[in-house]
């Protein structure tokens, strides 16, 4: 918290109670990815090309654009001799192959926990299994994960209904999951798969990342009895949207995704006595500060930090070398 907001915050019966979730905001994978683009710009100068948004947050992307990053979807747009960074969401193997064939300086900022899922898919395919991938159709992480296997070797399911309707395969089955799913939703889908296909195998440790789980558990602690919960994050951010859902499921009367705290309509908090505030894993802390400052300008607030767990995970920065 900034000293400005804290020092101007008085605990009073008339104050709006703000429950601030901890942990919130940037996870180790996002920190690593953003720092990778910054380091590449420092080492190689502008422009540095980035395949897909480095993380799903407009404010982060716009800041990096101003520094000289160029965000693209097709590697054909990468200028010869310039580095290209693969985003935290991961990429299909075909993208790595294309970068290698063009001798591009490819820098892989894929989250190590996403790479764990990629490796799991390749291992299960090598065992002769068909892989069920639990995740959101069209999400960049899902595109990258399915791209680790031959066509037809992976089936994506998103809902319990799809799990119930899944047809048996001639091959033995394995499952993996997107790293940013709702823990509860994923468990329900996996339960259906394990009931319908007793021989199915899964990862030794959950694919849902520690940060996603921690932020969902933290929001469950601030939601009960809250008039509303405000989740700072992008509509494109899967983990941020899951926080809104988790808040509602945990008892919040209302929950809203706040993409731009400076412009968000705070009238939704009118009459509220207790609100919760948290942020998705790709949302920088300064956006939370902006939201709290705006709340404090409207009314007296009392901030209570509700801590679920302390995070100390750090991922090693990727190598920067020619492909």
Image: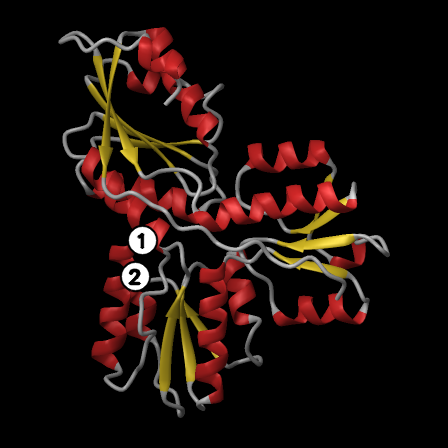
Q: Nearer the viewer, residue 87 or 6?
A: 6
Residue 12: x, y in percent? 16, 8
Q: Which mark is residue 109?
A: none
Q: Which mark is residue 182?
A: 1
Instruction: Give the side of residue 31 with respect to residue 243, left or right.
Output: right
Packing grade of label 1 (10 A; few <14, some 14-19, many >=20) is many
Instruction: Give the side of residue 268 with respect to residue 106, left or right.
Output: left
Residue 235: x, y in percent? 47, 40
Instruction: Give the side of residue 88 with respect to residue 95, left or right.
Output: left
Instruction: Give the side of residue 274 with respect to residue 68, left or right.
Output: left
How many discs mark residues in the rendered view? 2
Label 2 secondary element = helix
User: Does residue 138 appear in the picture of this structure?
Assistant: no
Q: Residue at the location (50% across, 66% down)?
A: 115
Q: Which mark is residue 186?
A: 2
Residue 266: x, y in percent? 37, 17
Q: Quadrant of residue 207?
A: bottom left
Q: Residue at the location (73% across, 49% down)?
A: 49
**What distance separates the C-alpha of mark 2 from that of mark 1?**
6 Å
Instruction: Check if mark 2's residue and mark 1's residue have beta carbons within 8 Å.
Output: yes
Residue 14: x, y in percent? 17, 7
User: Does residue 282 appear in the picture of this structure?
Assistant: yes
Q: Nearer the viewer, residue 46 or 296?
A: 46
Above or below, comparing residue 231 to residue 203 in the picture: above
Which quarter of the image is occupied by the C terminus?
bottom right
Q: Residue at the location (36% across, 47% down)?
A: 312
Q: Nearer the viewer, residue 211 or 223?
A: 211
Which quarter of the image is occupied by the N terminus?
top left
Label 1 secondary element = loop
Q: Quadrant of residue 170?
A: bottom left
Packing grade of label 2 (10 A; few <14, some 14-19, many >=20) is many
């Amino acid at each position: 918290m900034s000293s400005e907001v804290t020092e101007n915050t008085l605990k009073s019966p008339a104050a709006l109670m703000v429950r601030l979730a901890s942990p919130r905001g940037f996870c180790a994978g996002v920190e690593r990815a953003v720092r990778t683009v910054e380091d590449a710009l420092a080492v190689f100068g502008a422009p540095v090309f980035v395949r897909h948004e480095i993380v799903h947050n407009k404010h982060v992307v716009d800041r990096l654009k101003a520094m000289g990053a160029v965000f693209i979807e097709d590697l054909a747009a990468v200028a010869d001799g310039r580095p290209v960074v693969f985003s935290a969401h991961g990429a299909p193997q075909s993208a790595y192959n294309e970068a290698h064939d063009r001798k591009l300086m490819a820098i892989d900022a894929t989250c190590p926990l996403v790479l764990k899922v990629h490796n799991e898919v390749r291992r299960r395919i090598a065992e002769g299994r068909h892989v069920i991938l639990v995740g959101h159709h069209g999400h960049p992480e899902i595109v990258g994960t399915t791209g680790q296997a031959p066509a037809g070797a992976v089936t994506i399911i998103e809902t319990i209904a799809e799990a119930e309707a899944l047809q048996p395969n001639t091959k033995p089955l394995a499952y993996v999951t997107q790293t940013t799913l709702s823990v509860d939703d994923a468990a329900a889908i996996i339960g259906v798969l394990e009931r319908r296909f007793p021989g199915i195998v899964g990862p030794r440790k959950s694919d849902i990342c520690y940060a996603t789980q921690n932020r969902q558990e933290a929001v469950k602690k601030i939601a009960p009895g809250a008039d509303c919960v405000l989740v700072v994050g992008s509509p494109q951010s899967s983990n941020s949207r899951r926080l809104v859902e988790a808040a509602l499921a945990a008892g919040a009367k209302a929950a809203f995704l706040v993409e731009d705290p400076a412009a968000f309509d705070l009238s939704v908090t009118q009459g509220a006595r207790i609100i919760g505030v948290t942020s998705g894993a790709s949302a920088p802390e300064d956006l939370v500060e902006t939201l709290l400052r705006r709340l404090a300008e409207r009314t007296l607030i009392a901030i209570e930090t509700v801590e679920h767990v302390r995070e100390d995970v750090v991922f090693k920065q990727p190598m920067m070398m020619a492909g």
